Amino acid sequence: MTLNRRTVLAAGLATPLLAAPARAQDRFPSRPVTLVCPWPTGGSSDAVMRAFGESASRHLGVPVVVENKPGVGGTLGATAMLQAKPDGYTVTQLPLGIYRLPHMQKMPFDPLKDLTHIACLTGYTFGIAAAPDAPYKTLKEMVAWARANPGKLTYGHTGTGTTPHLAFEEFAHKAGFSTQDVPYKGSAEILQAILGGHVPLMSGTPEFAPHVKAGKLRLLATLGRERMKAFPDVPTVKESGWDTISESPFGIGGPAGMDPAVVRVLHDAFRKTLEDPKVLETLEKFYQPVIYMGSEDYTQYARRTFEAERSTIERMGLTRKA
């Protein structure tokens, strides 16, 4: 009897020990999470994504590894989700272009059907900057020069169909001048081009700011609703006389079909990054405001934005052919 009782007790003690590894495997996350940054290393997006990843790793308890996949207007992160398992171990930045480019060209993904929107975190500030030897010193002078030299105004941007590209083209349309645009993979490449004298003008994110402060570039205008705090004397495009405002919220997403519990874990971790002083410092450095939306609100935003971008593309005559 004593031996049987000990055997039963031993079996009872063994059960939770055997179950523990299974529970450990079921816990999310139990291994590193990959965060795709669809822009090159060295730019503001890369720096911000790495700040988010480092902060989120502390809340998740596992490393968040940033993987750069630049090109195609920042859409390769969404494309990567088509091959990723919906287990939460691969997520990506979701720039606004993913809601726009499907209206302009055939894309391998549907931003509403193929993605899970986890959380919106921040957004970009855009500006128009010129080389110091450009033949114009203000936005109005640039417009006058472009009108006097039809089709000769050359500028670089972050890729065909990206917000800096379309915002500048919309502005040009309203101001009545034509352009020659040169697409790059990101603002870091544009800066190399403009500082190297290859293009005289750029429309992009505020990687230009240090160079403006150093006198190597001249900031002609910004594209937000309000002036940049760092450059209070530089007007917006709208207050200069042309009704063009461009803002670009972005966040984190994963493949479609993710477990809601996993989405919640990721959401909570990235939401907490917005309270991290180092993250906030990085956002301030690159002039990016906090723009938070939870999973449900972010999903609704995606649907509205997808339809709004369709209208913009149709208005500009850039709708892709069937």
Image: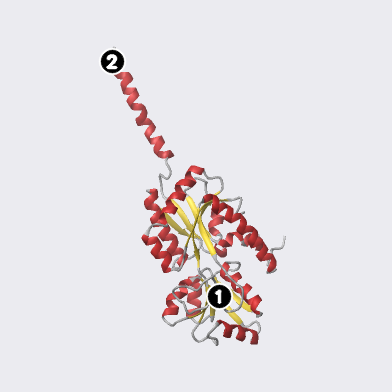
Query: 91 or 172, which is in the foreground?
Result: 172
> Mark 2 and mark 1: span between their CA atoms?
82 Å
| 199 shown above or below 187 | below
Name the front one of labels 2 and 1.
1
Q: Quadrant of residue 106?
A: bottom right
Give percent across and percent down for residue 77: 53, 57
Question: Residue 153 vs residue 49: left or right?
Answer: right
Q: Position of residue 245 (x, y in %)?
A: 58, 70
Quadrant of the rendering where the C terminus is positioned: bottom right
Rendered location of residue 89, percent (x, y): 46, 48
Asked if disc 2 and disc 1 are in contact, CB closer than 8 Å, the reply is: no
Dot 2, crowdedness within 10 Å: few (<14), some or many (≥20)?
few
Whether 269 is drawn above or below 40: the answer is: above
Q: Which residue is mark 2?
A: 3
Label located before the other in sequence (2 or 1) = 2
- The one nearer the camera, 149 or 225, is 225
Secondary structure state at the residue bearing disc 1:
strand
- Residue farthest toward the left in the current orientation of the protein: 2
- Taking the spot 66% from the left edge, 61% from the top edge, the residue there is 310
Q: Amino acid at mark 2?
A: Leu
Q: How has the structure been colored for display?
A: secondary structure
Residue occupying the point 41% across, 35% down: 22
Residue identifier under label 1: 156
Q: Amino acid at mark 1?
A: Gly
Let me know if residue 105 appears in the view: no
Circle 1 packing at 10 Å, graded few (<14), some (14-19), many (20+), is: many
Q: Secondary structure at mark 2?
A: helix
Tell me if I can see residue 186 in this picture.
Answer: yes
Out of 127 and 31, give the one closest to the viewer: 127
Point out the residue furthest to the top here.
Answer: 1
Provide residue 74's location: percent of width, then percent of height: 54, 63
